Each structure stands twice: as C-alpha cells, then as structure tokens.
Image (spheres, rainbow, N blue to C red):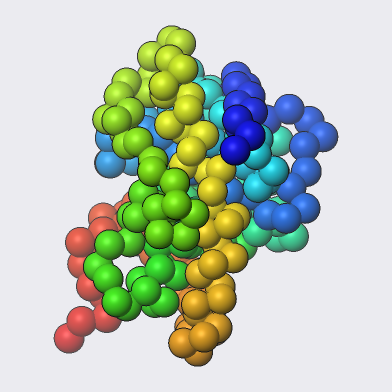
Amino acid sequence: MTAPKIKLHKGDLPAGLSFPKGVAIDTETLGLKPHRDRLCLVQLSGGDGTAHLVKFDGKSYDAPHLKALLADPKTLKIFHFARFDIAVLEHYLGVTTGPIYCTKIASKLARTYTDRHGLKDLVGEFLGIELSKQQQSSDWAAAELSDNQRAYAANDVLHLHAIQAKLDEMLTRVGRRELAQIAFEFLPTRARLDLIGFENDDIFAH
C-alpha cells in the first residue's frame, strides 16, 4: 500500500485545488461543544491518497478558499457523522456546507445487521485496514502537530471515498438510496438546530 501524502496548510487551503470526485472532510476540535470547544483542524482528501490538513490558530477563520469549497454546489462533501462537522464549520467559518454525503447515516440505513457504525468499523469491514484511534483525544490546539496526530487526522478522510462507493452499492441493494439522500439534505438544518440548543430534543416527537 502506497504511503499517503499529508500536506499541512496554515489558515486556509492553497488556491487552485480542485476535487472533481468530491472531497472527504473531517474536523478536529477541543471537545464536542461547538460554542465552547474551538475548531483546530480541517482535513480534506480528494480520494487520491493525499490529505490536506488546514490548521487554525484560533484567532482567524477567514479561509476564503476553504469556505468557497464548502459552499460549492458542484462539489460533493463526504463526511463520517456530518452532523457534528458541519455544525462546527458553520459556527466558526460562517458557511453552510453542501451538498453532503454522510457515511454514518448511510451505514445505519444499509448495514442493519450490526450496530457498529464507527469509521474504524467501516474501514475494517470494507477495506481490511485497522485504524488506530489513539490520537482521538489529543491536544489539537498544540503549536505543532506530531507525526502521529497528522497521520490520525489524515486517516479520517483518506478512506471515505472508497467507503462511500461500498455503501452506495448496499443502499441500492436494499432500496434506500433515495431515503439516504433525503436524510443528507436535512443535515444542515439538523446542525443548525444543534447550534441553537435543540441537540437533545426530538422536534418530531409528540
């Protein structure tokens, strides 16, 4: 297996990058509460074995190239658990991300034979790769990221294109592609509800 290329960028993506096959995206924060725990890193991959890591210092989130990509209606954004990531991106970058594909939602709709829908589970089942989650709770605001942190961040996006392809086959087989698409389209609204305090409320309940 060819070693991935990991490119670190400060504060924004470089100009001229394109992602014709869609872009896999993940974020690293200081916790799970967007209003409290700041966005530190956005990692992206075009499915070509290269991961781009955009590191933020917490002082500026201008990032015009990254914002343009997130809002570009022609570029599909592939996430695992998009609900959290797009809420964080909207809170810090002020941009609504779309269109979206969420591998966690797709997995829950397609892989009803299991309750294990984590990224590690999907990568293991579909690609036969064992992902290390050791750096999951590390300090992403550190002035310099360690090699292990960079590798961990890259692995969160390098495999999403391949996982999407597998899940699309399964969704088609069980007749739930359209249902998945409708769920993906609702995600920006779900994230907005989370940001204004409805994260634990089922607004559809009686």
Quadrant in the picture for residue 105: bottom left
Quadrant in the picture for residue 22: bottom right
Instruction: State the image coordinates of residue 28 (x, y, percent, origin top left).
Output: 41, 34
| Horizontal arrangement in the rendering, residue 193 relative to residue 180 (left or right) | left
- Which residue is at the front of the view, 42 or 91? 42
Residue at (59, 65) in percent of width and height: 165
Quarter that holds the N terminus: top right
Give the residue at the far left of this rendering: 206
* Residue 1 in sight here: yes
Give the residue at the far top of this rendering: 143
Residue at (29, 77) in percent of width and height: 113
Give the residue at the far right of this rendering: 16
* Residue 52 in sight here: no
Instruction: State the image coordinates of residue 13 (x, y, percent, origin top left).
Output: 67, 30
Instruction: State the image coordinates of residue 152 (x, y, percent, origin top left).
Output: 43, 31
Above or below residue 3? Residue 203 is below
How many dots with numbers? 0
Above or below residue 37? Residue 47 is below
Instruction: State the image coordinates of residue 23 (x, y, percent, origin top left).
Output: 64, 49
- Which residue is at the front of the view, 33 or 9? 9
- Which residue is at the front of the view, 175 or 180? 175
| Horizontal arrangement in the rendering, residue 195 relative to residue 42 (left or right) | left
Quadrant in the picture for residue 202: bottom left
Above or below residue 11? Residue 132 is below
Residue at (78, 30) in percent of width and height: 15
| Horizontal arrangement in the rendering, residue 157 relative to residue 111 (left or right) | right
Above or below residue 188? Residue 160 is above
Quarter that holds the C terminus: bottom left
Residue at (60, 30) in percent of width and height: 3
